[in-house]
């Protein structure tokens, strides 16, 4: 049964967070994002309208009008996390102010339940002031707040991704998702082990998204001598990049590596399809992850569509969509916690 609620997803992107709510049969009335490239995959896979709008400019009345009358109002979102991330820690990036915009909409709309997901570094960003200000808004509006940093593999994600998850409710205390796989983590093999093999630069005949970027002759030589779990430090010296030979580059061992079958993958970034961008080498095939493999490790369903039929598939565009998404598995557990909370408070 669906829950007597309606959800608006801010910064919805390609729909990872929304899809978790869809899987839990909690109606999503709209997704809002400024990236028009996300319109087709969001609407096609989630049967919900995509609204192209800068959240920083969104009016509270416009958001309020989206919710269905007589249903619990749930406002969820993941403000762009790049400015808070260790990969891109730029204090002058204007995107960090989008969390303040999220807080403004919460203050004015006063949804019954709020969910916010982001990178753990948000807690320390600008000495914690940005996150503390967000918490202060919720507290002043009468919300019961729960938050913690959740380790993806403990929640059924085959990826060593840690995420800050916050739930807040005006109805009463609300619990975070409970670990579902704490003692048995999913592995790379569990998720992508049965996909048909493809070579560097090849496209699977059965799935146009199962394609890998073409390696240069040098990188092909590098991956052939790369062992799962090892680093470029194990290579023949003639194959080590110049930057890694210098003192400033010797500490960067988490690039140009293969994943391991029996462990979760590293965090899937927007450039997971590049062998040199992280430990994104396939465990045994001489190539980097395919676009489909990255999507599966982000726990998108195998049939999730990221491009229209016949549309050209670009690594950079799809990589951005997949890497920026909230993992669907984590989103589903967040939705499940909210569903349980709403049911306990009379919104069955």
Image (tube, helix red, strand yellow):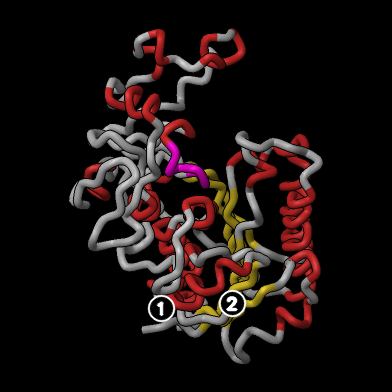
Residue 151 visible to an observer of this rendering: no
Q: What percent of the width, then of the height, locates residue 197?
A: 20, 46
User: Chief secondary structure of the magenta span?
Assistant: loop
- Any magenta on residue 273? yes
In the visual, does 281 lie left or right of 102? Answer: left
* Front residue of this view, candidates 75 and 199: 199
Q: CA distance from mark 2 to mark 1?
A: 18 Å
Quarter of the figure with residue 268:
top left
Query: What's the residue at 40%, 44% (across, down)?
Result: 213
Q: What percent of the width, then of the height, locates residue 186?
A: 28, 45
Decide: is 140 above or below 222: below
Q: Secondary structure at mark 2?
A: strand
Name the residue tied to disc 2: 50
Q: Marks 2 and 1: which is nearer the front?
A: 2
Name the residue tied to disc 1: 25
Q: What percent of the width, then of the height, locates residue 110?
A: 72, 74
Query: What's the residue at 55%, 67% (across, down)?
Result: 38
- Any magenta on residue 166? no
Residue 81, numbered circle = none
């Amino acid at each position: 049964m669906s829950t007597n609620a309606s959800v608006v997803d801010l910064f919805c992107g390609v729909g990872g967070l929304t899809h978790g709510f869809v899987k839990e049969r909690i109606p999503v009335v709209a997704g809002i994002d400024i990236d028009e490239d996300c319109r087709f995959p969001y609407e096609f896979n989630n049967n919900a309208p995509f609204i192209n709008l800068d959240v920083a400019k969104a009016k509270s009345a416009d958001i309020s009008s989206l919710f269905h009358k007589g249903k619990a109002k749930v406002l969820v979102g993941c403000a762009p996390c790049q400015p808070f991330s260790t990969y891109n820690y730029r204090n002058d990036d204007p995107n960090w102010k989008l969390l303040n915009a999220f807080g403004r909409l919460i203050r004015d709309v006063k949804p019954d339940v709020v969910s916010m997901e982001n990178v753990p570094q948000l807690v320390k960003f600008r000495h914690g002031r940005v996150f503390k200000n967000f918490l202060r808004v919720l507290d002043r509006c009468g919300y019961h707040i729960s938050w913690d940093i959740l380790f993806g593999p403990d929640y059924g994600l085959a990826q060593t991704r840690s995420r800050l998850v916050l739930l807040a409710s005006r109805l009463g205390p609300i619990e975070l998702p409970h670990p579902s796989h704490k003692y048995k983590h999913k592995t790379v093999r569990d998720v992508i082990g049965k996909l048909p093999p493809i070579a560097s630069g090849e496209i699977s005949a059965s799935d146009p998204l199962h394609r890998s970027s073409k390696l240069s002759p040098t990188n092909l030589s590098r991956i052939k001598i790369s062992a799962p779990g090892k680093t470029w430090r194990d290579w023949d010296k003639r194959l080590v990049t110049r930057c890694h030979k210098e003192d400033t580059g010797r500490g960067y061992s988490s690039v140009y590596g293969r994943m391991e079958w029996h462990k979760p993958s590293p965090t899937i970034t927007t450039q997971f399809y590049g062998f040199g961008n992280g430990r994104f080498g396939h465990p045994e095939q001489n190539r980097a992850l395919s676009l489909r493999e990255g999507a599966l490790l982000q726990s998108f369903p195998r049939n999730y569509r990221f491009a229209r039929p016949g549309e050209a598939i670009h690594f950079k565009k799809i990589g951005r969509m997949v890497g920026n998404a909230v993992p669907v598995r984590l989103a589903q557990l967040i939705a499940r916690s909210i569903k349980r909370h709403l049911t306990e408070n009379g919104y069955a």
